Amino acid sequence: MTVARLLIALAGAVGAFFAVWLLTAVVLRWLRANQVFDRPNERSSHTSPTPRGGGLAVVAVIVIGWGLASLTATAPFEPIVAAALAGLALLSWLDDRYGVAVVVRLAGHAFAVGLCMWTFPADLLIFQGVLEPLADRLAAGVLWLWFVNLYNFMDGIDGITGTETLALTSGLVACAAIGSLESFPVEIAAICGGAALGFLVWNWPPARIFLGDVGSVPLGFLCGWLLLLLAARGLWVAALIMPLYYLADATITLGRRLAAGEKIWQAHARHFYQHAAHRTGGHAVVVRAILAADIALVALAVVAAGMASPAISFFSAAVVTGALLWYLARP
């Protein structure tokens, strides 16, 4: 990974930060003027109506930033991925405003994932040849689809999605640099991270604006794409370590709800982080704990990216994740 590319990525991150920071102020005024609020209910983690739709600024900046970065010839534009990202943002915005049937949402997510999987080169195997090519694509597609939805499920308290996105994208850039992955789109990861940080200025507890599905779904889609690319280039352990807390919290909670016979598509407040937010009476302390764990997971992922045998890093990551879940689940 050349210094020039890393400097371009840093410049993109800084530009995305300021662009989202400024554009979110404009979006916030528009949302207030049009009464686009997330109103609290018995399952909510907030207590007063809060504008929802900050993802409009985040996604717009990422797509435009991607286009500008492609002018450097080091970050080739992926029109199908960018179009899928924008399409998911549109579908999710309609869901935020008017409500969209679950089956339609899932069909849209699956179509976006399938379309982008189709663009992967035939020799780009996510599971490194452990599975046959067709099985590799199907398994990766299912995982990507789950990641898109769990990212949305986990966006339930102030600051959590911005924090997770910043951690993941920082780790992706670091792992690509350590692994000398010249073909990895570090510029896009950096732009996504800068955009997340710019939104965090507005969304840090107590939040003045919420991301909404229009932000959480596309961010999950883009981060999932980047993680799959990292795994396909041989750093699959690092790609698994970085989002391990999100994967564990969402998957365990889904399993519990399925076992209880609940309608899993309905809103709820049973995630580990939601329990902790209700217990502590504040979001900031919970997000700080998640951030601390994320920093540890990113560090372990970077170590795994530079090791021939990363088993110790993965075991350590499991311990970190287990400790965080225990802390969040305390009565």
Image (spheres, helix red, strand yellow):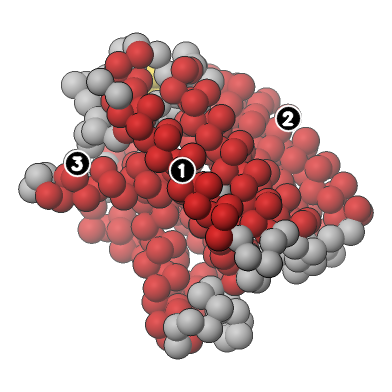
Q: Which of 92 and 269 is in front in this view?
A: 269
Q: Where is residue 226 in the image (x, y as percent from the top left)?
A: 59, 59
**Mark 2: amino acid:** Phe
| Residue 270 left/right relative to 185 | left
| Tag shown at residue 266 | 3
Sequence order check: which comes first, mark 1 or mark 2? 2
Residue at the spot x=48%, y=86% of the render?
133
Q: Is 249 situated above or below 275?
A: below
Q: Confirm or deny contact between disc 1 and disc 2 (CB under 8 A).
A: no
Q: Where is residue 149 in the image (x, y as percent from the top left)?
A: 36, 51
Separation of disc 1 and disc 3 at Cα?
A: 31 Å
Q: Nearer the viewer, residue 90 or 327?
A: 327
Q: What element carries label 1?
A: helix
Sequence order check: which comes first, mark 1 or mark 3? 3
Q: Is mark 3 on a helix, strand or loop?
A: loop
**Mark 1: amino acid:** Val
Residue at the spot x=64%, y=31% of the render?
197
Sequence order check: which comes first, mark 3 or mark 2? 2
Question: Which residue matches tag 1?
Answer: 319
Kindly tell me whether residue 39 is visible in this rendering: no
Quadrant where the image shows the N terminus: bottom right
